[in-house]
């Protein structure tokens, strides 16, 4: 039982955005080198994400952890499986009042069947492996969330071609029931 709990905890930590890189001294440097944002933008986005997440967890630990929070260039995305409308409203209001936030988008899923966590973690791991294996894709910029087999792809990518490849990989992953791409290619100049 203890071993199972330790493995689940490790899987959860590794599923967190940037968590694997945090275990290595070169992780932060690698993230910056592969990111389309400047170091200042990355720092501002991480600060915004941390402030929002801290406020959510302080309000309600369980519900706060259920809200996945992402920020790219001041644009916040909140997603998760929640039924609590009051907490959803609190999350949006908290994000909107956070300094540096330009806009807030939400993607709420209804709570799914019990016991889908293991399947979702397997899908996420398979997809991450496929994305990393595609050397033509800058996959370090792509974050994934899976809820009941539905995949969300988030992040900044080098091109629309990279976004399309990531979506194709997600759709081809066994167990995936749907894909929502929130990937942002660079703006045309």
Image: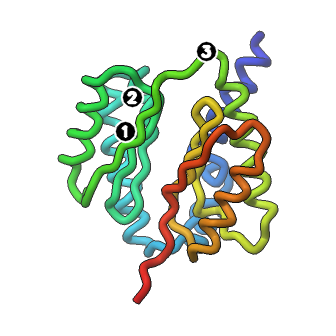
Is 157 placed left or right of 48 in the picture? right
State the SS at label 1.
Answer: helix
Q: Residue furthest left?
A: 97
Distance from disc 3 to disc 1, alpha carbons, whole Å, reads 24 Å
Is 11 placed left or right of 89 in the picture? right
Is 16 placed left or right of 1 in the picture? left
Disc on res. 176:
none
Is 146 placed left or right of 186 in the picture? right
Instruction: Identify which residue is drawn at 29% across, 35% down.
Output: 91
Comes first in the chain, label 1 or label 2:
1
Residue highlighted by disc 2:
64
Distance from disc 1 to disc 2, alpha carbons, whole Å, reads 7 Å
Identify whether 138 is placed above or below 85: below
Q: Which of 187 and 27 is in front in this view?
A: 187
Q: Residues within 10 Å of mark 3 (few under 14, many from 20)?
A: few
Image quadrant in which you'd find residue 87:
top left
Q: Residues within 10 Å of mark 1 (few under 14, many from 20)?
A: many
Q: Quadrant of the N terminus?
A: top right
What x and y, as percent, mark residue 76?
35, 52
Residue highlighted by disc 3:
114
What x and y, as percent, mark residue 162?
64, 70
Identify whether 175 is placed above or below 35: above
Residue highlighted by disc 1:
53
What x and y, as percent, mark residue 131?
73, 58
State if disc 3 and disc 2 touch (CB < 8 Å). no
Instruction: Identify which residue is drawn at 66% across, 17% down.
Output: 115
Comes first in the chain, label 3 or label 1:
1
Instruction: Identify which residue is drawn at 77% across, 18% down.
Output: 4
State if disc 2 and disc 1 touch (CB < 8 Å). yes
State the SS at label 3.
Answer: loop
Q: Which of marks 2 and 3 is in front?
A: 3
Identify whether 147 is placed above or below 38: above
């Amino acid at each position: 039982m203890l071993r199972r709990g330790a493995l689940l905890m490790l899987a959860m930590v590794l599923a967190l955005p940037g968590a694997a890189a945090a275990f290595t001294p070169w992780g932060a440097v690698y993230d910056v080198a592969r990111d389309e944002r400047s170091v200042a933008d990355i720092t501002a986005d991480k600060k915004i994400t941390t402030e929002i997440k801290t406020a959510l967890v302080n309000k309600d630990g369980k519900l706060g952890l259920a809200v996945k929070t992402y920020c790219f260039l001041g644009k916040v995305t909140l997603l998760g499986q929640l039924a609590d409308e009051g907490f959803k409203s609190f999350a949006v209001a908290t994000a909107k009042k956070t300094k540096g936030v330009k806009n807030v988008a939400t993607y709420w899923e209804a709570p799914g069947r019990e016991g889908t966590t293991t399947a979702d973690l397997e899908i996420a791991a398979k997809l991450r492996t496929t994305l990393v294996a595609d050397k033509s894709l800058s996959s370090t910029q792509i974050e994934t969330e899976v809820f009941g087999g539905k995949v969300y792809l988030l992040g900044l990518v080098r091109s629309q071609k990279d976004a399309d490849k990531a979506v194709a990989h997600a759709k081809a992953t066994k167990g995936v029931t749907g894909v929502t791409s929130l990937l942002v290619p660079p703006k045309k100049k």
